[in-house]
Every structure is written in structure tokens, then in C-alpha cells.
């Protein structure tokens, strides 16, 4: 299971639910992690690019757009057109679908 850092200086961590031990960490600065259909998306609170990381290792795999939802090889992303947010369907970078 991935959880966001517990303090303002912690990054997301992966916890083994059987042992409750941390098995992977991402960064030592405030990050948020969201999981969509097996894809773990990491962001720095709106600063810098979104990234997908390996669901087991936490290793960076590829950049991502701002994902709202995902299913299979398709992501639904937020795009601003003339300042108005829209949802678009895009293909997910195949590296984000990689398994460790």
C-alpha cells in the first residue's frame, strides 16, 4: 500500500500490509502519491512535472500529465484551454505500465 508522508518533510512510502514495514520510499521532500489502476503518480504539490514510479520499487519510470483517472492503457487528464479546465483521454506512457 502507498501512503503519503506523515509530516510536511516526508515523501510517499510503500508499506507491506503483512509486516507493516516500509518497503520503498520516494524522496525526502513533500510529495503526494496517487494510485490509478496500478500506476503510482507522484507530484510535488504542483511544482515540477508529475511522474509515475514503479508500484513496488518507487523507481521513477516516466513523466505523466495531470491524471484524473486511469484504466488499462488510457488516462483521463486535466488540460486547460483558454484558462478553462477540460478532461481529455490520452494513452499512458508504456513505461508507466511496466512491472518490476
Image (cartoon, rainbow, N blue to C red):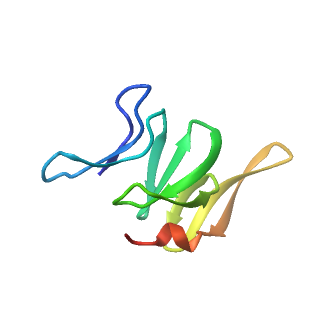
How many labels sit on residues?
0
Task: List x then y, in percent, for residue 39.
Answer: 45, 61
Residue at the limit of the structure toward the left, as seen here: 19
Q: Is residue 43 left or right of residue 48?
A: left
Residue at the limit of the structure toward the top, as seen here: 8
Q: Is residue 41 above or below residue 96?
A: above
Task: List x then y, in percent, for residue 51.
Answer: 56, 53
Q: Is residue 81 left or right of residue 43?
A: right
Q: Residue at the spot x=61%, y=58% of the render?
A: 63
Q: Is residue 22 above or below residue 65?
A: above
Residue at the limit of the structure toward the right, as seen here: 82
Task: List x then y, in percent, for residue 2.
Answer: 34, 49
Quadrant of the image containing the C terminus = bottom left
Q: Is residue 29 above or below residue 76?
A: above
Q: Residue at the spot x=62%, y=38% of the render?
A: 46
Q: Residue at the spot x=57%, y=36% of the render?
A: 45
Q: Nearer the viewer, residue 84 or 1?
A: 1
Q: Residue at the spot x=41%, y=64% of the render?
A: 38
Amino acid at each position: 500500500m502507498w501512503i503519503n508522508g506523515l509530516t510536511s518533510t516526508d515523501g510517499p512510502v510503500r508499506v507491506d500490509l503483512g509486516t507493516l514495514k516500509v518497503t520503498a520510499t520516494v524522496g525526502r521532500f513533500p510529495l503526494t502519491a496517487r494510485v490509478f489502476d496500478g500506476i503510482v503518480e507522484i507530484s510535488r504539490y504542483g511544482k515540477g512535472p508529475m511522474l509515475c514510479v514503479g508500484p513496488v520499487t518507487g523507481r521513477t519510470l516516466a513523466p505523466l500529465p495531470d491524471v484524473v483517472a486511469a484504466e488499462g492503457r488510457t488516462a483521463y487528464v486535466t488540460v486547460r484551454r483558454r484558462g478553462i479546465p477540460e478532461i481529455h483521454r490520452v494513452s499512458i506512457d508504456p513505461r508507466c505500465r511496466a512491472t518490476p
